[in-house]
């Protein structure tokens, strides 16, 4: 019975509205986080709505070589 709940939760998370997945988030310079974004980041979208957030930095950082 426990595996059934796991499958239902997984289907619910992957089939949710604006979930784009971690690849899309990382490609656009974001980072997937569980729960909340850290200070200095904002919620750009969801990796897996509504639990895993795609957070991006508030200030653009210059890439160093």
Image: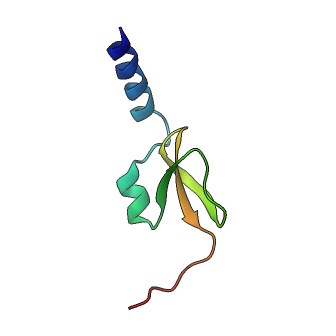
Q: State the quadrant of the C terminus.
A: bottom left
Residue 56 rendering spot, x and y as whole percentages: 55, 64
Q: Quadrant of residue 57?
A: bottom right
- Lateral position of residue 19 relative to residue 45, left or right: left
Task: Give whichever of 53, 18 is nearer the camera.
Answer: 53
Q: Quadrant of residue 44?
A: bottom right
The residue located at (60%, 55%) in the rendering is: 37
Residue 28 rendering spot, x and y as whole percentages: 44, 65
Q: Quadrant of residue 6?
A: top left
The residue located at (51%, 51%) in the rendering is: 33
The residue located at (33%, 16%) in the rendering is: 3
Q: Is residue 33 above or below residue 30?
A: above
Q: Is residue 64 above or below residue 38?
A: below
Q: Residue furthest top?
A: 1
Residue 30 rendering spot, x and y as whole percentages: 48, 63
- Lateral position of residue 46 relative to residue 22, left or right: right
Residue 43 rendering spot, x and y as whole percentages: 60, 55
The residue located at (47%, 59%) in the rendering is: 31
Task: Give whichever of 16, 39 is nearer the camera.
Answer: 39
- Lateral position of residue 36 relative to residue 23, left or right: right
How is the structure coloured here? rainbow
Q: Residue furthest bottom?
A: 65
Q: Is residue 58 above or below residue 53?
A: below
């Amino acid at each position: 019975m426990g595996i059934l709940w796991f499958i239902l939760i997984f289907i619910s998370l992957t089939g949710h509205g604006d979930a784009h997945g971690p690849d899309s988030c990382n490609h656009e310079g974001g980072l997937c986080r569980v729960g909340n974004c850290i200070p200095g980041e904002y919620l750009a979208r969801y990796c897996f709505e509504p639990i895993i957030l795609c957070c991006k930095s508030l200030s653009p950082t210059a890439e160093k070589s």
